[in-house]
Amino acid sequence: MFGADGWIFLEATDNGRGIREADMNKPGSFGIRGMRERCHQLGGDLRVSGIPEKETCVIIKIPVNGKEQYAL
């Protein structure tokens, strides 16, 4: 995790089986959908990519002041 120009970035990569585009769009993919919704609520973005049979990479970008801006 690191911060730059008012943003916090988090990148996580595994060496598992890799995620496919079809897996990310399944109706039951609540984990990815939930992470994406939380990032958007904070004014940020979530990207998920994968190489089948190799790895999955998740990148999150959130503004440092996002929580204060979007707090309920």
Image (spheres, helix red, strand yellow):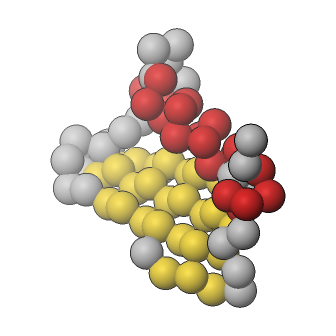
- Residue 67 is situated, as x and y percent measured from the top left of the image, at 67, 58
Please say whether residue 44 is visible from this viewpoint: no
- Residue 3 image-quadrant placement: bottom right
Compared to 51, does 37 lie above or below? above
Residue in the picture at 79% in, 58% down: 69
Quadrant containing the C terminus in the rendered view = top right
Residue closest to the far bottom: 5
The quadrant the N terminus occupies is bottom left
> Number of marks in the image?
0
Q: Going by the picture, which residue comes out furthest to the top?
A: 27
The location of residue 42, given as percent across then percent down, is: 69, 52
Give 68 or 2, whichever is nearer the viewer. Answer: 68
Residue most extreme to the front: 72
The residue closer to the viewer here, 7 or 11, is: 7
Residue at 47% in and 67% down: 10
At a point 48% along the width and 35% down the height, the residue shown is 32
Q: Residue furthest left?
A: 16
The x and y percentages for residue 49 are 47, 50
Q: Nearer the viewer, residue 51 or 63?
A: 63
Q: Would you place residue 51 above or below residue 30 in this image? A: below
Near-viewer residue (71 or 35): 71
Which quadrant would residue 65 be assigned to in this image?
bottom right
Give the image location of residue 18, x and y in percent: 30, 44
Q: Is residue 44 left or right of residue 54?
A: right
* In the rendered image, the vertical position of residue 25 relative to residue 45, given as above or below: above
**49 sits left or right of 4 in the view:** left
In this view, 60 is above or below 63 = above
Q: Is residue 24 visible?
A: yes
Tell me which residue sits at (60%, 42%) in the image.
38
Q: Along the horizontal axis of the image, is 5 left or right of 3?
A: right
